[in-house]
């Protein structure tokens, strides 16, 4: 900020330009109000019943920090300017002091009182931020893994893709269970070929070709049978016993079957915390 060196000897040239220089220098403080917002209560303005106490406000549209003169509560705030004239050496009276302040009033150019926001001291704001950061760090433990259904470039700050879950479906831990009792264990397979022991109990019809039997009476002691395969004819003789086939005809393609449960492909992300 600009400043004046008033310690020189020999008679300081104190003129109106000097005062104007000073006024320009401290007007810079108005810009600090912009840090707070559009319409801000910087100090005071406490409401008691139907009255509002005096205080200090900032109005960004004017880029001014102004004193607020308290009065009865109303809907709008206006800016007033009281002008004081002072006598000059040449005998004239001129406007010198322009006292500006905000207060309640009715004007089309007014500002809604409801839009003025009270700003907490920076120490209070910093303490609240620190508390929120502590809650975030302790509400979501480092290492938490979550399902993420959006693209990788949209993963939020503090999270990374959890690559060990690529191609896997999570299953709940169950103590003392052979399959599910060890954390981080991988199990299962994408496709599976059944073994004989895994097949359901079943049987097949046996194809023994077409055997034909014919009989003629040979008198006492038995019968004569004529046996033919596929009805092609054959020798005549005595027949006794069973007809068996050692194997059925081969069936099936010996291909593995899909072992994937109904699924939707997502990403798993892991919380790694925020940079300080």
Image (spheres, grey):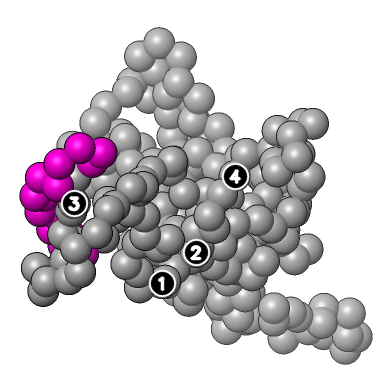
Mark closest to the chain's N terminus, 3 or 2: 2
Mark closest to the chain's N terminus, 1 or 4: 4
Residue 233 higher or lower than 262, as above or below: below
Q: Which residues are magenta?
A: 209-222
- Which quarter of the picture shows residue 114? top left
**Disc on res. 193:** 2
**Residue 204 placed where, x, y %?**
32, 51
Residue 137 is at least partly visible in this image = no
At a point 46% along the width and 14% down the height, the residue shown is 48
* Residue tagged 3: 224
Q: Are marks 2 and 1 in contact (CB under 8 Å)?
A: yes
Q: Is residue 172 left or right of residue 205?
A: right
Q: CA distance from mark 3 to mark 2?
A: 52 Å
In this rendered view, identify the residue nearer to me: 70 or 258. Answer: 258
Task: Single out the mark in the foreground, 3 or 2.
Answer: 3
**Residue 72 placed where, x, y %?**
33, 21
**Residue 244 placed where, x, y %?**
36, 55
* Residue tagged 1: 255
At a point 74% along the width and 54% down the height, the residue shown is 185
Mark closest to the chain's N terminus, 2 or 1: 2
Q: CA distance from mark 3 to mark 4?
A: 71 Å
- Which quarter of the picture shows residue 276? bottom right
At a point 57% along the width and 68% down the height, the residue shown is 166
SS at circle 3: strand
SS at circle 4: loop
Q: CA distance from mark 2 to mark 1?
A: 7 Å
**Disc on res. 111:** none
Residue 119 higher or lower than 24, as above or below: above
Q: CA distance from mark 1 to mark 4?
A: 27 Å
């Amino acid at each position: 900020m600009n400043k004046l060196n008033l310690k020189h000897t020999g008679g300081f040239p104190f003129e109106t330009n000097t005062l104007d220089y000073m006024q320009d220098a401290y007007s810079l403080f108005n810009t600090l109000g912009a840090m707070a917002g559009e319409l801000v209560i910087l100090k005071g303005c406490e409401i008691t019943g139907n009255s509002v106490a005096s205080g200090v406000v900032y109005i960004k549209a004017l880029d001014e920090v102004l004193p607020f003169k308290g009065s009865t509560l109303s809907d709008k705030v206006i800016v007033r300017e009281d002008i004081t004239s002072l006598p000059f050496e040449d005998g004239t009276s001129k406007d010198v002091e322009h006292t500006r302040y905000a207060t309640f009033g009715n004007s089309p150019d007014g500002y809604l009182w409801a839009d003025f926001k009270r700003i907490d001291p920076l120490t209070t704001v910093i303490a609240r931020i620190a508390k929120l950061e502590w809650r975030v760090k302790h509400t979501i433990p480092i290492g938490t893994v979550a399902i993420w259904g959006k693209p990788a470039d949209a993963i939020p700050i503090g999270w990374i893709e959890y690559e060990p879950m690529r191609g896997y479906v999570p299953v709940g831990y169950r103590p003392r269970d052979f399959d599910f009792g060890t954390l981080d264990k991988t199990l299962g397979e994408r496709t599976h070929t059944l073994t004989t022991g895994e097949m359901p109990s079943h049987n097949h019809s046996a194809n023994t070709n077409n055997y034909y039997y014919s009989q003629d009476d040979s008198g006492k002691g038995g019968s004569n049978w004529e046996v033919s395969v596929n009805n092609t004819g054959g020798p005549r003789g005595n027949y006794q016993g069973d007809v068996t086939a050692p194997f059925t005809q081969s069936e099936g393609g010996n291909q593995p079957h899909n072992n994937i449960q109904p699924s939707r492909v997502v990403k798993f992300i892991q919380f790694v915390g925020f940079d300080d």
